[in-house]
Amino acid sequence: MSIQIAEFDFQILGCFPIIFQLRPHLEEAKFTEQVRYQMKEGYQLAFLELDEQAVAVAGFRIYTSLASGKFLYIDDLIVDELKRCLRRATPTQGYGKQLFKWLIEYAKNHGCEHLSLDSGVQRFAAHRFYLMERMRITSHHFSMEL
């Protein structure tokens, strides 16, 4: 088991089945091109690999803002739905927890003062996870389609 940042197209494409579970509007044929475009803007794609297959994926960027200083922002964070611990009888593998800890260490190693993310209001299991990982709800996110 290892966590690494996707650098090659085959690694990016290997993350698609997991990201698709979070972002079902994405098309596999356009995924690598989209990720490559976002990489030009600072986006990175980290994945936890088990038996040469991604089981958890995080898309993230490092920003600096007046409000937060330097921080790591998580765009996407997902564990394969078949590998998640949802309080099942089977013991947890903790893939999400491992990837989340890796992101925290990455942020610290890159001089970040904060780690943040937005989460859809309907994602209750994700919210439980974030709260258990000592994250706080610090704002409301507002948006509008243009």
Image: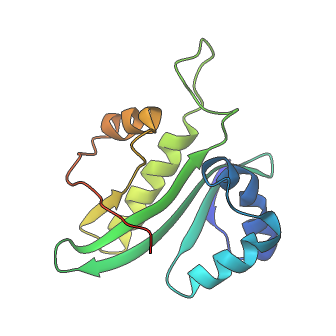
Q: Residue at x 51, y 85 (%)?
A: 41
Task: Judge by depth and name the residue closer to the eye, 140 or 38.
Answer: 140
Q: Is residue 92 above or below residue 49?
A: above
Q: Residue at x 23, y 45 (%)?
A: 136
Residue 76's spot in the image, x, y percent? 52, 58
Residue 91's spot in the image, x, y percent? 59, 19
Q: Quadrant of residue 4?
A: bottom right
Query: What colour scheme does the image use?
Result: rainbow
Residue occupying the far bottom of the picture: 40
Residue occupying the far front of the picture: 146
Q: Is residue 26 above or below residue 82?
A: below
Residue 126's spot in the image, x, y percent? 45, 38
Q: Quadrant of residue 111?
A: bottom left
Q: Is residue 78 above or below residue 110?
A: above
Task: Judge by depth and name the residue closer to the eye, 101 or 20.
Answer: 20
Disc tally is 0
Q: Residue at x 23, y 46 (%)?
A: 137
Residue 22's spot in the image, x, y percent? 60, 49
Does 54 sit left or right of 124 as displayed? right
Q: Please identify the quadrant where the C terminus is shown.
A: bottom left
Residue occupying the far top of the picture: 89
Q: Quadrant of residue 144?
A: bottom left
Does 29 sit left or right of 114 as displayed? right
Does 37 sit left or right of 96 as displayed? right
Does 74 sit left or right of 31 as displayed? left
Q: Residue at x 78, y 60 (%)?
A: 14
Q: Is residue 34 above or below residue 90?
A: below
